[in-house]
Image (cartoon, rainbow, N blue to C red):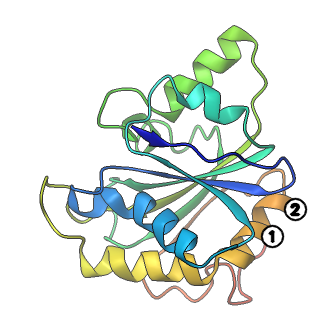
Amino acid sequence: MSEKVSASPSRLLVVGCGNPAAGDDGAGVEIVRRLSELGDCGCDLRVETAPGVGLLDVFSLADVILFVDAVTSCGVPGTLYLASLPSEELEPRALGSISSHGWGLVEALKLAHALGRPVPRLFLLGIEAGTVAQGAPRSAAAEQAIALVVERIPHLKSLFLTNNSIGTRSFGPNDRSFPGNGGFRI
C-alpha cells in the first residue's frame, strides 16, 4: 500500500518506507507523517509501506529523491546514515533488506537500469533500528532520531538538492555534526 503524492521536479521528494506497526521499522513513515503535519516543509512527501516493483514508478516523480527507512546493520540504535545511492558500501548490509517483502531499492535500481529507465539522484537516510517486532512500540533512540531529522529537514533538503553525491556517512546518537548543526561538510 502506498500513499500517492505528486512531486515537483524542483523539490526534494521524501519517501518514508517501512511498517508502522513494527517498532522502529516505522521510522521512515513517521518522519513523513510529522513533516506533513508541518504544512509545507518545502518537500514533496510520499509513504511506501510495501515497496516493491512500484518503486520504479517513484523514480519518475522527481529529480531528487530521499528514501527514509529503518536499517539493521548491528549499529547503535538511533544512528543515522546518509548515503548516495547506489552505494556499494551499503548494498550488502543495509539496502538489501530495506523491504521485508524481499524487494527493495537495490532490486528496483537494478531493474530500472536493465530496462533503460532514467534514475534520478537518489539518497538514503537510514535510522538504525533497535526493534522491528510486529506490535512493538518505537524505541526511545528511534524517536530521538526521528525528531532530529524532522527538525533538520531544511538543511537536509538543501544538502540533497545541491549535491550530486554525498558519499556515505554515519552519525551516532547525539552526534552534533549531523547536517544543520554546522559540522557536516561534503
Image quarter (top left, top right, bottom left or bottom right) of the N terminus = top left
Report whether 186 appears left or right of 88. Answer: right
Question: Percent position (x, y) of residue 27?
Answer: 38, 63
Q: Disc 1 vs disc 2: Cβ atoms closer than 8 Å? A: yes
Q: Amino acid at mark 2?
A: Thr
Q: Quadrant of residue 151?
A: bottom right
Image quarter (top left, top right, bottom left or bottom right) of the C terminus = bottom right
Depth check: 146 or 79 in front? 146
On the image, numbered disc 1 is attached to which residue? 158
Question: Percent position (x, y) of residue 108?
Answer: 55, 25
Q: What residue sits 84% from the left and 51% below the top?
A: 164
Near mark 1 (Cα within 10 A), the count class, few <14, some 14-19 or many ≥20, is some
Q: Is residue 171 above or below residue 70?
A: below
Near mark 2 (Cα within 10 A), the count class, few <14, some 14-19 or many ≥20, is few
On the image, numbered disc 2 is attached to which residue? 162
Q: Amino acid at mark 1?
A: Ser
Q: What residue sits 43% from the left and 77% below the top?
A: 145
